[in-house]
Image (cartoon, rainbow, N blue to C red):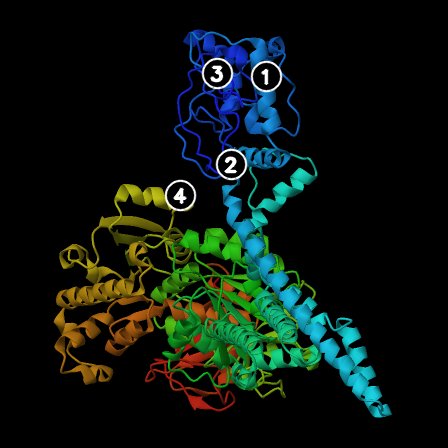
Amino acid sequence: MPDTNGAPNSNPKPNPNKPERPPLLKKSKIIADNTLAGQLFPAVRRVSSTSPSSSESHTTSATNDANFGFGDRDYVYPSFLGPHTTRSRVNVKSTSKSQRNKLDLPARSESMPSYLSCEAKVESKMKPKPKLKAEKDLNALSIQVSSSASSALSGSSSANFSNARRPSAHRYSWILLLLKFLCTLSVSHTLYLRNEVSKLQEENISLRRACSHVDLASAGIMELEEVNSLVYFGNADSRTVALYMVVFILVIPFALYKYLDYLPRIIDLLKRKYTIKEEVPLMKRIAYVVDVCFSVYPYAKLLALLFSTLFLIGYGGLALYAVGDGSFIEAIWLSWSFVADSGNHADMVGAGPRIVSVLISSGGMLIFAMMLGLVSDAISEKVDSLRKGKSEVIESNHILVLGWSDKLGSLLKQLAIANKSIGGGVVVVLAERDKEEMEMDIAKLEFDFMGTSVICRSGSPLILADLKKVSVSKARAIIVLASDENADQSDARALRVVLSLTGVREGLRGHVVVEMSDLDNEPLVKLVGGELIETVVAHDVIGRLMIQCALQPGLAQIWEDILGFENAEFYIKRWPQLDGVPFEDVLVSFSEAIPCGVKVAAYGGKIIINPDDRYVLKEGDEVLVIAEDDDTYVPGLLPEVNKGLFPRITDPPKYPERILFCGWRRDIDDMIMVLEALLAPGSELWMFNEVPENDREKKLTDGGLDISGLENIKLVHHVGNAVIRRHLEGLPLETFDSILILADESVEDSIVHSDSRSLATLLLIRDIQSKRLPNKDSRSVPLRHSVFSQSSWIREMQQASDRSIIISEILDSRTRNLVSVSRISDYVLSNELVSMALAMVAEDKQINRVLEELFAEEGNELCIKPAEFYLYDQEEVCFYDIMRRGRQRQEIVIGYRTAAAERAVINPAGKSKQRKWSLDDVFVVISSGD
């Protein structure tokens, strides 16, 4: 073989006994240029003889050659001879195609090793070799390369080529190793099982040959076993197939978990579709779908647990069949027993069955724990739903209360009293509070509900689902309570609740009673609700009632008796036997009730209070009465009534009065308008509060009051705080006929604060009055004050109360007890009176028309009249006679109060009984107000 210089070898015949020495590493002394470059000299070093600028033209060729990993050796070192330490790689430059054509080098064959196609490096400024000598060297080198070496070198070159692309496929190497390992393991185990099957088949053949006679029964059993094997897996190799299936099913989840995100890319490559935008990984999408499924569908967790159990039983049975010797059905049964009871696997024999049974038992314990968790969560959720009031109310013909306020206690009490005659009813309360808290607050009332059940549910009246939960469509009455916010916010919320009620698809069976806070907001609610809505303006009712009580002392207690269900109340009922009877005879037809008006059918059901005596009841008319209960009265025979002679005294003329308002109410403009209609000309209204005078006129004008149009009263303004004594002392408190202590607008949201201010103002005013009134007028102490003789300050205030009337607006019943025991003031209990009115309208919505007329400043009203209008002193007559005499004055007498009694009697019993009356007695009447 010629050397690198092209000279022949010095020792053409080497000694065969002498071992071959390895090639010596030496630098090439051949000076060559780029004309000798070719693909047959990859390891020959070449140094460029051109300048750096001229060498840039070969950058592309040098880059391609560098990928084959050649060093700076002076000899060819193929890869099949083993590893060899190389130096750091350098850039290699190749000749162009035109240069190879000039050299007439032999064409590179496809089977030629790729590493031989690289160009040799030569040093610069070397003499080029002759063309013929280079061709000889190339031919000699090509002949010496054997075919086997050529193929080996070709493999090495391909390995080097793949080594260049190895960084991109590095992440797949461990997967390939795992797959190779699994394949090797599977093949080995398959060969082992195949060998075992062959042995068993040989033994079976030998046993059949040994047995010459086989009975029919044994033959039948053999046939049955063959049929069973064919049914499940076809032949004796079914256990091998089962084992493959077990391994495959076991590997599939891990492979999916690792490569599931690449599935969309593979699909795109198969479809030759390339998407540039980033998509959400498939694993995240599947996790999101599972999360939504578990959140939306309540039974998804249970179904998932059931599927997991069935999968574990089936997979475990398949694994047991693969490693055991029983039938597939027996393996499934064993798998179920291991899942159901983890201790059943202790009797298994053999390594394979024991391992599989332990795994199945572990999965069974996990499933059992999940089942316990689901059952525990379901029970806890159900208990929490019951405890928090989220369950549905299955009731009908019940009363539904929407909202929560301080009036709820007295409202429930009145509803329970109303349902006492029918053995009790059902009241459902829906509020945005916790059910347990509501039940605890109701239990604190310490009131016997007399058979009435109170059911609390937590929810919002603005949500239709919560309304359906309390059977809103089946309720016979719905009460919407005002919230503890300011008037506008409370009425706005009531309006939204009414809108929610009108959106119930099933419709409403009963009517809706809405508690309003401001009279100006009432028309809007009625417009939205229509005929089903009945409104009770609490603030307006209390304001008008306070004025009536200020002008007529003792009227507050009478209103409590009429509005509440404990004594007498209003009822409307039709009596066919009274058709054609004039009202003057209807008036004395009931021994246990007092007729007050007629509901005229011809006028569209209009209620006429205190009608004319000559009005004759027609068919369809109903009678309005005051009675103990709706089933305690019936019309009877007309009693004998003797009108007799009685004083014809007309009502005395009205005199100017002086009234003081302590505090500023939200509807104070409406109260002034009522006073304008009831007081005589020349009356004065003193307004004492903390609102500046300039702001007062603006507020009154904004409320709709025409100050310049007041004819009967004159407004007198004073600025001050009603709980400061020196401010009150600047007022002539002893000169007022009536003093009204209002719940100030600034503290009306706090019941305790409001009542504290009212009580403090009451005590200060009474004390100042007792100091200013002359003592000679109080020399004799009345009998009813003797119990307080030990408390001089209370006695002095009681004496002052005989000279003037003070009406205090009290919101809390506990404060009322303090005021009533001291007897130093008449009072108006706001919350209880409003609750009573709501309960009455809830029981019968027609009563709302009666209350609206009696509370109005015009029309019929409830009055207290002296006895001298109806009888003489010590005259002995029955109550029917007094009722007849009252009709001469266009009045209906409904009760009386004797001089020795502290409370009036409404709808007295024994109306035909004769008794002696005194001029100190008073009668309660419904007057036309003319």
Structural distance between the alpha carbons of marks 4 and 1: 122 Å
Q: Position of residue 856 (x, y in %)?
A: 47, 60
Amino acid type indicated by mark 3: Asn
Q: In what quadrant of the picture does the N terminus appear?
A: top right
Q: Kindly report which numbered mark, 3 or 2, lies closer to the viewer in this rendering.
A: 2
**Residue that label 2 marks:** 16
Structural distance between the alpha carbons of marks 3 and 1: 12 Å
Q: Kindly report which numbered mark, 4 or 3, lies closer to the viewer in this rendering.
A: 3
**Mark seen at residue 136:** 1
Amino acid type indicated by mark 2: Pro
Q: Earlier in the sequence, mark 3 or mark 1?
A: 3
Mark 3 residue element: loop
Structural distance between the alpha carbons of marks 1 and 2: 26 Å
Q: Position of residue 616 (x, y in %)?
A: 67, 73
Structural distance between the alpha carbons of marks 2 and 4: 131 Å
Q: Considering depth in this image, is 419 or 707 the residue closer to the camera?
A: 419
Q: Considering depth in this image, is 762 or 926 the residue closer to the camera?
A: 762
Q: Kindly report which numbered mark, 2 or 4, lies closer to the viewer in this rendering.
A: 2
**Residue that label 3 marks:** 5
**Residue that label 4 marks:** 702
Mark 2 residue element: loop
Number of dots carrying numbers:
4
